[in-house]
Amino acid sequence: MSNPGEFLQACADGKIWLFCSKCNKEKNINDVEHIDCIGNENYWGHEPWWHDTRVFNCKECGTRQESQIEYVP
């Protein structure tokens, strides 16, 4: 999925997930409050969004978390 449009469509379709270490559960990217995105300085390829770390607030447990994204078709 090297096309940014495909990545955005996967987000809209609910196929991108994060992991909350407090709940010990996967969270859909659409079901969390997004705070920040930390870019991976060591990645220089064409798909940087797969290598970023997302900072988010989990609505279920109320904690601030960091997670890499996961694509689940």
Image: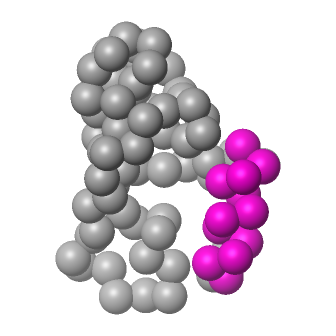
Residue in the picture at 35% in, 30% down:
57
User: Looking at the image, is 41 positioned above or below residue 61?
Assistant: below
Q: Position of residue 62 (x, y in %)?
A: 33, 16
User: Looking at the image, is 72 positioned above or below residue 20?
Assistant: below
Residue in the picture at 43% in, 76% down:
48
Q: Position of residue 25 (x, y in %)?
A: 49, 20
Q: Position of residue 33 (x, y in %)?
A: 43, 35
Give whichever of 45, 34 is nearer the camera. Answer: 34
Q: Tell me the quarter of the image containing the N terminus.
A: bottom right
**Majority secondary structure of the magenta segment?**
helix
Residue range corresponding to the magenta coloring? 3-14
* Camera sees residue 66: yes
Specify whether residue 4 is painted magenta: yes
User: Looking at the image, is 55 positioned above or below residue 42?
Assistant: above
* Camera sees residue 17: no
Give whichever of 68, 61 is nearer the camera. Answer: 61
Left/right placement of residue 59 relative to residue 70 reads: left
Residue in the picture at 28% in, 20% down:
63
Give whichever of 46, 32 is nearer the camera. Answer: 32
Left/right placement of residue 6 relative to residue 57 reads: right
User: Looking at the image, is 4 positioned above or below residue 70?
Assistant: below
